[in-house]
Amino acid sequence: MLGANFVMVGRPFMIALAALGAKGAHHAHYIIKDEIENIMEQVCAKNISEIKEQSVTLGKDFFLNYLS
């Protein structure tokens, strides 16, 4: 289950919407959808519910590096 950590996906939509209106939001949707489909193929998931926490590997200090 992806859970609340997945809420970070809202920012690209808001930026795209502010920059290009509805066309930008649709484009952001296409990009994110394409990325999720690519990830699903890489982990052999037929649907998004098959992506488990074990399918995701983060570096030791991923969040510390991300925030700095």
Image (cartoon, rainbow, N blue to C red):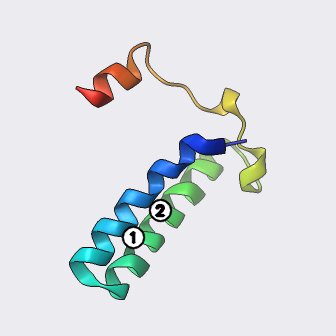
Quadrant in the picture for the N terminus = top right
Q: Which mark is residue 56?
A: none
| Residue 60 lies in quadrant | top left
Position of 14 relative to 48 (above/below): below
Q: Residue at x 55, y 25 (%)?
A: 57
Quarter residue 31 falls in: bottom left
Give the residue type that dot 2 points to: Ile
Measure how far apart labels 1 and 2 are at the Cα level. Answer: 6 Å
Q: Is mark 1 on a helix, strand or loop?
A: helix
Q: Nearer the viewer, residue 38 or 32?
A: 32
Query: Do the CB atoms of the residues marked 1 and 2 lie less than 8 Å apart?
Result: yes
Q: Up-down: is 7 above or below 15?
A: above
Q: Residue at x 71, y 45 (%)?
A: 44
Question: Residue 65 location, x and y as percent?
Answer: 29, 23
Label 2's element? helix
How many numbered badges does the structure rendering display?
A: 2
Left or right, 37 with reference to 68: right
Other-residue count near label 2 (Cα within 10 Å), few / some / many at <14 / 14–19 / ≥20:
some
The residue pinned by badge 1 equals 28
**Who's the residue at 76% across and 56% down the image?**
47
Residue 1 placement, left or right of 64 = right
Q: Residue at x 59, y 59 (%)?
A: 37
Residue highlighted by disc 2: 32
Quarter holding the C terminus is top left
